[in-house]
Amino acid sequence: MDKLERALEAAIELGASYAEVRYRSDEEVFTYMRGGTIHASGINNRSGLSVRVLVNGAWGFASTNRMDRVEEAVREAAKLAKASSSLRKRPVKLSPAAIYNVRYNHLVKEPITLERMAEFLRLVDASIVEADERIKVRNIYMNYNTTRTTLLTSDGTNIESEIPRTSIFVIMAAHDPAKGTQERMLELGYAGGYETLVNNNVDARIEEEARILAKILDTARPLPHDDVMDVVFGPELAGILVHESVGHPLELDRIMGREGAEAGESYLTIEGIGRFRLGSEEVNIIDDPTLPGSYGFYMFDEEGVKARARELVVRGIVTETLMNREYAAYLGADSNAAARSSDYDKEPIPRMANTYLKPGNWNAEEIVRETRRGLYFKTYREWNIDDRRWFGRYGGHEVYYVEKGEIQYMVRNPFIEVTTDKLWSSVDAVGDDLQFVAGECGKGNPMQGVPVWMGGPTFRARGLRVLKAP
């Protein structure tokens, strides 16, 4: 702590109008199993410190994994800020933020050891084989990561946190010489330890996915032709659609052009905030880092701002974007705690946490029953979206043909092509069965991957373009 406090003092002495020092350590326990055999496992430890300073209206950022070089990092950050200040067209300003002195951690009841991890993966692999012996490709990666962070700012904020996260990523592929190949990828993740796997029936869920994979291989048949029809989306589809077509384009730094040369742009403009109609009145989209047990959980962001639920879309209107202190200041607004960083040596930038379509009043079965003719996309196998997040193409995995409110048969590998406004403006029914899947959301240069949840309930959109398998 003394070194962090001294780093702040040194930054101010070097001319910084604002400075923050962040120490972070990550302890990772991991195991990789392929085909029932453990191919890699171990424990990784990574730690270091970063310094970010604001000098003459410009940022400077530096990091080190050696505590005897902290003041050297401070000097490097100040040097970079001074060098870039003359190049900025608009000086950086920060929105006001409350000062906090807080220690918090997310509860973990059962930490995960390598032995327990191996035992669980053997159980999961055996259940996949039992579901269908044709599933020869079985890659399972499991991770238990504990992130400890200390943040000090020149404003006076001092926040310490400890967040454990457990995740499991599965790739399965089934092959039949007469029927072809089908594959499935699934990631589940939670804040907490081994208890999250038990409480969420992760092993049973993966086994069920294996059985569905075999069922698709055996019974699914292609659509006879491309068509326009109603589409019912399951919670997994709700998650990826919300994340890609709403979450990313509503990151304020992206809207203002920072991401343009790296990850793309946005269909939204500054003028559209608060008035742009994205969808029907049934569409309400939230990003909430504070959900207990969530993979994207945090109570304070990397700038020390207290987290809250962000109401991105309310009754179809874009009402809020994801902001850090810098970009909020450009709008004369307050940060909504979206500043996140993937590691000690990465700067915090506006990111999603747990983004989802807010549940409605329909029952999922009722939505299907009230659909005269259409497809029921329960899960997906691939997705693509353009740089402005306006035109998307989504390939289905577990998909059913619906006629007169009844499921008729499984459909093999259909696609949906749709613009963002057509998708969300066509929503007329939203279910109450909120569910989430996990992901590692990529953004930035250098690339940062942060843990997120993506989710929602079952919902229906009318009159979408559906394509048969290529």
Image (cartoon, helix red, strand yellow):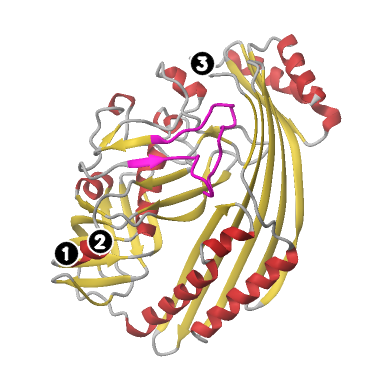
The local secondary structure at tag 1 comes to loop
Measure the alpha-carbon separation of dots 3 and 1.
Answer: 50 Å
Magenta range: 285-310
Q: Which of the marked residues, 3 or 2, is nearer the chain's N terminus?
A: 3
Q: Is residue 311 left or right of residue 306?
A: left
In the rendered image, residue 198, in percent from the top left (x then y), is placed at 57, 64
Residue at position x 28%, y 74% in the image: 411
Label 1: how many Cα within 10 Å (few below 14, some 14–19, many 20+): many
Mark 2 residue element? strand
Label 1, on which residue?
371
- Please give the name of the residue rendered at 52% of the width and 49% of the height, measured from the top-left corner: 294
Q: CA distance from mark 3 to mark 2?
A: 43 Å
Residue type, numbered disc 2: Val
Most extreme residue toward the front is 109
Horizontal side of residue 354 vs 468, given as left or right:
right
The residue under label 3 is 96
Instruction: Give the residue at mark 2.
Output: 232
Q: Residues within 10 Å of mark 3 (few under 14, many from 20)?
A: some
Q: Are marks 1 and 2 in contact (CB under 8 Å)?
A: yes
At horizontal 47% and vertical 36% (from top left) the residue drawn is 261
From the viewer's perspective, is residue 9 above or below residue 355?
above
- Disc 3 marks a residue whose amino acid type is Pro
Whether tag 3 and tag 1 are in contact, CB under 8 A, the answer is no
